[in-house]
Image: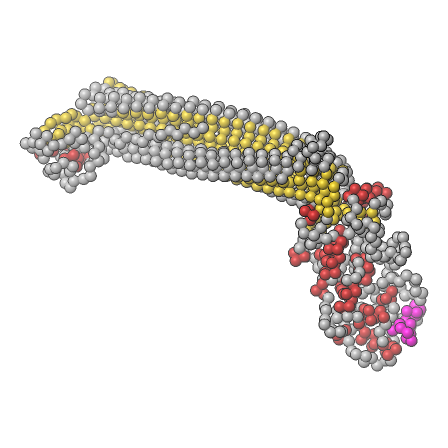
């Protein structure tokens, strides 16, 4: 019987509660002898469907193909089409149109006129058909049995009858007529049949080899998804204990009690086209289909123990059960591997199963090379929606090994194993997607010995070891995996391994996020690495990974930690919100760090210590709680073209013999100094722009050294450069300007060599030298200052050679009492001498200084007015406001007039309203020094 598809849905069947109403319209045909379109395709397209077994028969009977020619002989076995070949008037006592010869003028195709009227009425739908109003006799008009079945029998009765039919008989009856076809296509009928055979809650489709998909009927575009699923799966062999001895008329399925029996039968069938197999019951086989797609074996609910399954052909094993299929179908073994795919299994499939390997811990049989699932070389099976468990304390739950081992493992649950979850080794490959890998005693995944898998969208979590471990030259491409809450690192790379990790989320590790060590490599790109207990990324022991475009944030320690001679390329990352340094470099490590954003850390931005090195360039480091960059303990990094700004302390902090180069950086807007150098540190600071510091531009103190060359230091709230407490830097060819305090302040024993600098437009002295300091100034230009050019006070001295000092407001070179600098070849010219002019004009010096600057001149005290050591009075106020008082000359030095400031008892007669007293006399405000916080 030919097979064909049909698309009518259950909605086409109209049911009624009263007899004869709302029946399905008959098809529009010229005659009743015209055949209906063939309909049911079961078992598969273009294959004859055997008839049900005859009573007492030993094999299937052949179906009779439909015929459109008329015949006067009736065969012994009638096809369902025989009902339709009989004329509506062919009944007892009526003429036989089927017996007409080809040359007869009357035939079923051309009935007589009276018959045509009756026949036309019979062809109307039941609800429109006239009740026995035919003008011909009852004998000429009464319906035959065929007519009654096709047109008069109520839909509900037909539907009830069809519910008793199995799939092959249902297909045959659907080819009787259009009405039968539409009723036989009822979705509820096919759902019942489908669930009785396959047990699934939803239709399962097999759209391609190694691909099975459940689809909700509501989401399917098919008119009858249950029937289409039935058709696609009908070729399957069933492992269903208790069914092998049962025979079903109208069903063409094979049943076995054991998986091995089904596999043997499938091999025998594919090898010899046999129709029977041992250990099972099979009405018929579908050899043509099996040869093209491979055998399909359904494992029904139950636990199958002790079966040793070695699959070497394109066989599909799939669980069949209601509810959660995989939980209901269990394959378990205590020795050797539970399921093995070996060479020849190119398009094999295992899906919706639970695989268990449960070796007896007291057994003396070694099992360290046995696994729950094993995939060998030269095979590429698909393992889908499986639950995989192993209680073996050695080896792994899943092992993929060997050249050309290339499985697809997806939607599997590899969890709660007492060993490694998934082990890929020895040049194996494969695609591993959407798997749940969790709570395993060792690593969730091992990749070793040039294995190169592709792993996407896996959920790897809560392991009692590392999440993913690549080592011994393992490779792999890891994309969009969620790796979290593992006891050790989320991802570990060791011993020449070189994975590519992209778009993964690695977080909440109980130690670190990524750990690369012992010459590890790897590319980590576009990942989110966050909330790990230790550093987000660890790089050590000559490892050299690439860390690019990652988000590394909210670590409970640092962001990236490079130590023990680690290297690496760290670029284009966004590193923020970490409890310790965003990047830490120590112990001879030498990475390249560039184009990163390192910000809002609870500690510093970049911390280089214990002889750390590194090239740090074109990063943006900002808004960190401590220093933007810390360099200490013999470290020598190179920082170029970075933007280091808006920190809550120092921009770049060199201390305890921190060295290195700071070149072409923008360092600005810090609450402390832009750069601080102390305790033996000796960096090269060249070509930088340092501005906006609330505590000055550069602070060198406590024995700091350094070469500051060709920098622009401007617009700082305090001095552009501070040199103090025995520090001895060298400043060459810098531009220090527009400071809101002095240009360079040297005090408390500070030294230094200042050569060929341009110092201009600063609010206080261009160079202030105080308190036992002794710098050397050569060939500098100091000009356009809003106070003096150079001021030397408080027992300090200096060597001034060949400097140009000009156009400064208070004067060129101002020396306090007792100061005797070494002066040679300086040019001091065109200064405004505003102090001398104010004194000559009888003005109070506060008139030209207010309390923001400190002009150098003679200052006095008034004993009559009980002025203290912190008060000073200018010479004009002594003459006018304190005339006749007991006054005392103190010295020639820097001060502002307290009388003019209104801080004395008597109001100044030379000045207007009193102003605020800052209680500051001799020096500019002292800079804040950073307090070192040691972090290991």
Count of numbered circles in the view? 0
Is 907 placed above or below 249 here? above
> Is 765 on the left or on the right of 836, as rendered?
right
Residue 578 is drawn in which quadrant?
top left
The magenta stretch spans residue 92: yes
Residue 845 is drawn in which quadrant?
top left
Residue 876 is drawn in which quadrant?
top left
The quarter in which the N terminus is drawn is bottom right
Q: Choose between 825 and 264: the one closer to the eye.
A: 264
Residue placed at 71% from the left, 59% from the top?
223
* Residue 355 visible in this rendered orientation of the protein: yes
Q: Position of residue 873 (x, y in %)?
A: 14, 31
* Residue 351 visible in this rendered orientation of the protein: no
Magenta-tinted stretch: 89-103
Residue placed at 32% from the left, 22% from the top?
727
> Is 593 on the left or on the right of 30, as rendered?
left
Q: Position of residue 349 (x, y in %)?
A: 72, 43
Q: Position of residue 879 (x, y in %)?
A: 9, 32
Q: How is the image coloured?
A: secondary structure
Is 801 placed above or below 56 here? above
Q: Position of residue 551 (x, y in %)?
A: 50, 39
Q: Choose between 826 and 483: the one closer to the eye.
A: 483
Residue placed at 89% from the left, 72% from the top?
90
> Is 896 on the left or on the right of 762, as rendered?
left
The magenta stretch spans residue 925: no
The quarter in which the C terminus is drawn is top left
Report the predominant secondary structure element of the magenta stretch: loop
Residue placed at 66% from the left, 40% from the top?
389
Q: Choose between 280 and 802: the one closer to the eye.
A: 280
């Amino acid at each position: 019987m030919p097979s064909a598809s049909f698309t009518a849905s259950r909605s086409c069947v109209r049911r009624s509660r009263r007899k004869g109403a709302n029946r399905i319209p008959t098809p529009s045909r010229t005659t009743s002898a015209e055949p209906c379109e063939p309909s049911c395709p079961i078992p598969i397209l273009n294959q004859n469907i055997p008839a049900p077994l005859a009573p007492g028969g030993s094999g299937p009977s052949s179906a009779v193909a439909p015929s459109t020619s008329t015949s006067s002989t009736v065969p012994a076995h009638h096809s369902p089409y025989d009902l339709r070949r009989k004329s509506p008037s062919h009944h007892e006592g009526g003429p036989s149109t089927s017996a007409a010869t080809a040359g007869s003028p009357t035939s079923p195709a051309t009935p007589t006129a009276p018959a045509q009227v009756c026949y036309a009425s019979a062809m109307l739908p039941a609800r429109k058909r006239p009740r026995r109003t035919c003008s011909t006799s009852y004998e000429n008009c009464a319906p035959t049995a065929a007519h009654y079945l096709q047109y008069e029998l109520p839909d509900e009765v037909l539907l009830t009858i069809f519910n008793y039919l199995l799939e092959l008989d249902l297909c045959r009856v659907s080819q009787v007529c259009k009405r039968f076809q539409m009723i036989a296509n009822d979705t509820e009928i096919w759902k019942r049949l489908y669930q009785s055979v396959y047990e699934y809650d939803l239709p399962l489709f097999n759209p391609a080899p190694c691909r099975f998909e459940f689809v909700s009927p509501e989401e399917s575009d098919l008119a009858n998804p249950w029937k289409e699923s039935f058709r696609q799966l009908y070729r399957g062999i069933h492992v269903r204990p208790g069914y092998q001895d049962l025979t079903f008329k109208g069903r063409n399925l094979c049943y076995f009690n054991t998986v091995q029996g089904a596999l043997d039968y499938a091999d025998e069938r594919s090898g010899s086209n046999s129709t029977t197999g041992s250990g099972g019951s099979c009405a018929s086989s579908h050899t043509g289909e099996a040869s093209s797609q491979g055998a399909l074996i359904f494992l029904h609910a139950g636990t199958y123990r002790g079966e040793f399954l070695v699959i070497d052909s394109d066989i599909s094993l799939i669980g069949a059960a209601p509810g959660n299929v995989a939980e209901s179908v269990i394959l378990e073994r205590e020795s050797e591997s539970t399921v093995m795919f070996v060479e020849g299994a190119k398009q094999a499939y295992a899906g919706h199963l639970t695989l268990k390997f449960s070796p007896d811990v007291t057994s003396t049989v070694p099992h360290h090379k046995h696994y729950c699932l094993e995939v060998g070389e030269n095979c590429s099976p698909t393992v889908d929606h499986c639950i995989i468990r192993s209680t073996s304390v050695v080896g792994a739950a899943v092992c993929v090994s060997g050249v050309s081992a290339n499985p697809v493992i997806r939607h599997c649950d590899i969890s709660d194993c007492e060993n490694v979850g998934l082990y890929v080794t020895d040049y194996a490959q494969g695609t591993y997607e959407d798997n749940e890998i969790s709570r395993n005693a060792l690593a969730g995944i091992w990749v070793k010995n040039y294995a190169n898998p592709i792993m996407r969208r896996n959920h790897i979590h809560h392991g009692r070891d590392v999440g993913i471990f690549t080592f011994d030259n393992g490779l792999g491409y890891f994309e969009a995996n969620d790796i979290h809450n593992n006891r050790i690192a989320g991802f570990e790379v060791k011993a020449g391994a070189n994975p590519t990790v992209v778009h993964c989320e690695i977080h909440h590790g109980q130690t670190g996020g990524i750990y690369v060590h012992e010459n590890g490599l790897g590319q980590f790109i576009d990942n989110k690495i966050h909330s790990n207990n230790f550093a987000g990324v660890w790089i050590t022991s000559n490892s050299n990974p690439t860390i690019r475009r990652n988000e590394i944030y909210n670590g409970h320690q640092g962001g990236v930690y490079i130590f023990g001679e680690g290297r690496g390329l760290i670029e284009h990352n966004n590193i923020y919100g970490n409890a310790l340094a965003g990047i830490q470099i120590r112990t001879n490590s030498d990475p390249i760090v560039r184009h990163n954003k390192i910000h809002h850390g609870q500690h510093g931005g970049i911390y280089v210590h214990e002889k750390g090195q590194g090239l740090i360039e074109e990063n943006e480091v900002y808004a960190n709680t401590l220093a933007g960059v810390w360099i200490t303990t013999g470290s020598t990094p190179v920082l170029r073209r970075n933007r280091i700004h808006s920190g809550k302390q120092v921009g770049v902090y060199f201390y305890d013999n921190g060295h290195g180069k700071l070149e072409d950086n923008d360092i600005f807007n810090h609450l402390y100094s832009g750069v601080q150098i102390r305790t033996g540190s000796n960096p090269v600071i060249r070509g930088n722009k340092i501005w906006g510091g609330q505590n000055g531009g550069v602070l060198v103190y406590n024995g700091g050294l350094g070469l500051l060359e060709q920098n622009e230091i401007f617009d700082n709230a305090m001095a552009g450069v501070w040199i103090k407490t025995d520090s001895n830097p060298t400043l060459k060819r810098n531009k220090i300007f527009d400071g809101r305090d002095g240009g360079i302040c040297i005090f408390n024993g500070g030294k230094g060599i200042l050569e060929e600098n341009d110092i201009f437009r600063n609010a206080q002295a261009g160079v202030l030298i105080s308190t036992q300091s002794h710098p050397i100034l050569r060939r500098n230009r100091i000009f356009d200052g809003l106070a003096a050019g150079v001021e030397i006070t408080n027992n300090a001295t200096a060597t001034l050679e060949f400097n140009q000092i000009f156009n400064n407001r208070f004067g060129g070179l101002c020396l306090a009492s007792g100061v005797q600098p070494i002066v040679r070849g300086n040019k001091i010219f065109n200064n405004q001498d505003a102090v001398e002019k104010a004194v000559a004009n009888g003005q109070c010096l506060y008139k030209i200084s207010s309390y923001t600057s400190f002009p150098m001149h003679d200052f006095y005290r008034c004993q009559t007015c009980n002025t203290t050591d912190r008060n000073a009075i200018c010479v004009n106020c002594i003459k006018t406001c304190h005339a006749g008082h007991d006054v005392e000359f103190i010295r020639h030095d820097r001060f502002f007039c307290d009388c003019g400031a209104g801080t004395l008892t008597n109001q100044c007669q030379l000045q207007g309203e009193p102003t605020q007293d800052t209680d500051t006399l001799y020096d500019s405000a002292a800079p804040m020094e950073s307090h070192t916080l040691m972090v290991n």
